[in-house]
Structures are given as structure tokens and as C-alpha cells.
Amino acid sequence: MIGTGHWAGPLALEAAQTPGAELVACFDTDAEAARHFAAEFDVRASSSLDEIASDPEIDAGIACVPNSRHREVTVALAGGGKHVFVPRPIANFVKPAKEMIAAAKSAGVVLFVDHSSSFRPEVEAMYDAVQAGRAGKIFGGHAMRSADWEKASGGGWHVSPRECPGGPATLLGVSAAATLTRFLGKPVAVKGSMTAGLVPGRVPNVTTFLIEHESGAHSTLVASGVSAVPNDHMYFYGMRGVVMSGPTATHAGSRAILAEAGARVLVELESRGRRKRGMEMFVEAVNTGAEPGATPVLALDALATIEAGLRSVAENRRVTLAETIAG
């Protein structure tokens, strides 16, 4: 575990619950925090990142550090032949993300970015329905993710232009962008708008992106940090019907629904399997050599969508992903 802050505990517990994973060491630039974490999880506190990267008994590392340090940790671990687990987003900007992908590819290690929310059982049920043609040709989609950041823990970095430059778009929108990409195909351009000043802070409060996809489909993405009731809704529109997920009138948890043309009732889709944690998907990729569903390419496209949207707001124009990824 590289970094022992707020998210390290939940990730450590996730690793403990994942067959094939064993947490053995940690490192933090705050030595006292590392010692506390080491005592709590019965692991050793290493003296440096290089010590972990060069340890032949360690197979992989978790980059539980601020987004701005994902590149630094990934390059160091990959340089030592270690597989790397990175929470979303892969980075704050495309340039360091590309360098992370290149470092992992050069070292022949797995770089896993935790976009496991794009593979939740209800999302997979929607994906199956779309692939089976039950909604017909899909021409559009909509995703909304929101939270109340005034009440959320970790609010300091949430409102930091360095650590969360797009505000809710960086933290919440990037996962929605990944799901939109899975269903509608690679994004090609974005036009964005944003609202700021609803609550104090130096990052946007609400962002709205209109996204064009290679398939010809269009989607909208809304990310809000000022929602009194946090929500996560997803809709995909087809020529024969609509698939959607989110809380329903009778279920607080997310459900997948199919509304077919001419049907008198909505159909609740059966979720496929159980939810896989990101750590489980990571271990599976490391052990089998198979490319994880949440590939670095998906993570890069999702991040590039957000960066293009923010650039669109700043420059008041449509911004392509090609120019964003090219740098």
C-alpha cells in the first residue's frame, strides 16, 4: 500500500477479502501515519517507495496517493516489475496518464484502473440487453452522478484545483464517462458547460458535457457536487426501447430496467452475477494474464473526455479527443 490516508483502510480491507491477495507492506511520506497503518493491518512499514519497488517478494502495489502522484508511484512500481492498482481516475490529466500506460507496457506489468463501477451487475444486465438488440440501435445516452460535497469527508482535496481540477467531473464524471464509452463507443468530441459559486470553492460545482461518439451516438454527462440527494442514473436510448439504471420507486438500491416500445409495463432486468470488487478484477488479471475489463485504454478515454470537456468550457468551443490525447 503506497499511501496510508483516507482510502487506504477500505482498500486494505478489500485486499484482505480478495482470494490471492495478501497485504504485506506499506509506505507513506508521513512516517507516523505509515506506522499506525502498519500496526492496524499487521504489515511492515517500509522506509521508501524504492524499497517496495525493488523487493523481489512483492508482486504488486496499490497507488493510494493523491491523483497528482499516480504517475510517480506507477512509474516507480512498474520500473521494479510490479503490477499496479490505481483508483480512478487514472490521473488528473492525459499527459501523465499516457506516461503511466507506457511505463506499464514497457515493463510488461498490469496497470489496473479501478473503473469497476462500469461493470456492476445491473450495468452488465443493461449491457447484455443492448447487445441482444432488445432496445434496437442505440442512438444516445445520459449519465448523471452527484454528491453533496459540503457533507462529504475529504472535502479539502475535493475542492483543490491541483488534486481535483474538474471538481465533480474529475471524481464522479470520469466513471460515468467510462460507462458511456462501453455502451456507445469511443468518444470523439465534447462540448461543455459548468456552474461554479453555488458553494464556496475553487473548482466547478456542476459540469454538463455533450459527447459525440464514433458510433454516431450522442450522450450527455452531468456531474454535480451540490446535490442534496446523491444519485447515480444511467439511460441508453434505442430505436426499440430504453435501458436505464438507478434507484426506483420501490428500491433504494440501483436496478436495471428495460422499457420496450409499445409495452404496457417496465421490465426489471436480472442482474448478472455478483458485484466484483476492483481488487478482485485486478488479481484476476495478474494471475491469468488476461486483459482486465477496466483497461487503461478505457481509463484514458474516460479521462480524455473529462479533460476535453473542461477545455471546451475554458475555450468556448467543441474539443476533440484526438487533440486532447495528442497533447
Image: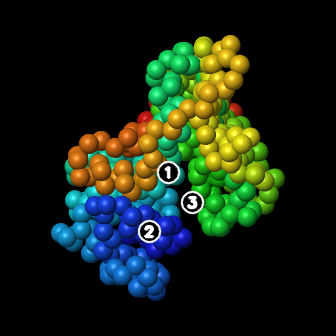
| Cβ–Cβ under 8 Å for marks 1 and 2 | no
Q: Earlier in the sequence, mark 1 or mark 3?
A: 1
Q: Secondary structure at mark 1?
A: loop
Q: As rendered, which of 252 and 123 lies closer to the eye?
A: 252
Amino acid type, residue under disc 1 in the picture: Pro
Q: Name the outermost residue toward the left.
A: 56
**Residue at 71% from the left image edge and 19% from the top image edge:** 264
> Residue 78's spot in the image, x, y percent?
27, 58
> Residue 56's spot in the image, x, y percent?
18, 69
The residue pinned by badge 2 equals: 13
The residue pinned by badge 3 equals: 163
Q: Secondary structure at mark 3?
A: loop
Report crowding for label 1: few under 14, some 14 to 19, many 20 or more residues within 10 A (C-alpha).
many
Report crowding for label 3: few under 14, some 14 to 19, many 20 or more residues within 10 A (C-alpha).
some
**Residue at 39% from the left image edge and 57% from the top image edge:** 279
> Residue 178's spot in the image, x, y percent?
50, 39
Is residue 106 visible in the rendered image? The answer is: no
Q: Secondary structure at mark 2?
A: helix
Q: Quadrant of residue 63?
A: bottom left
The residue pinned by badge 1 equals: 89
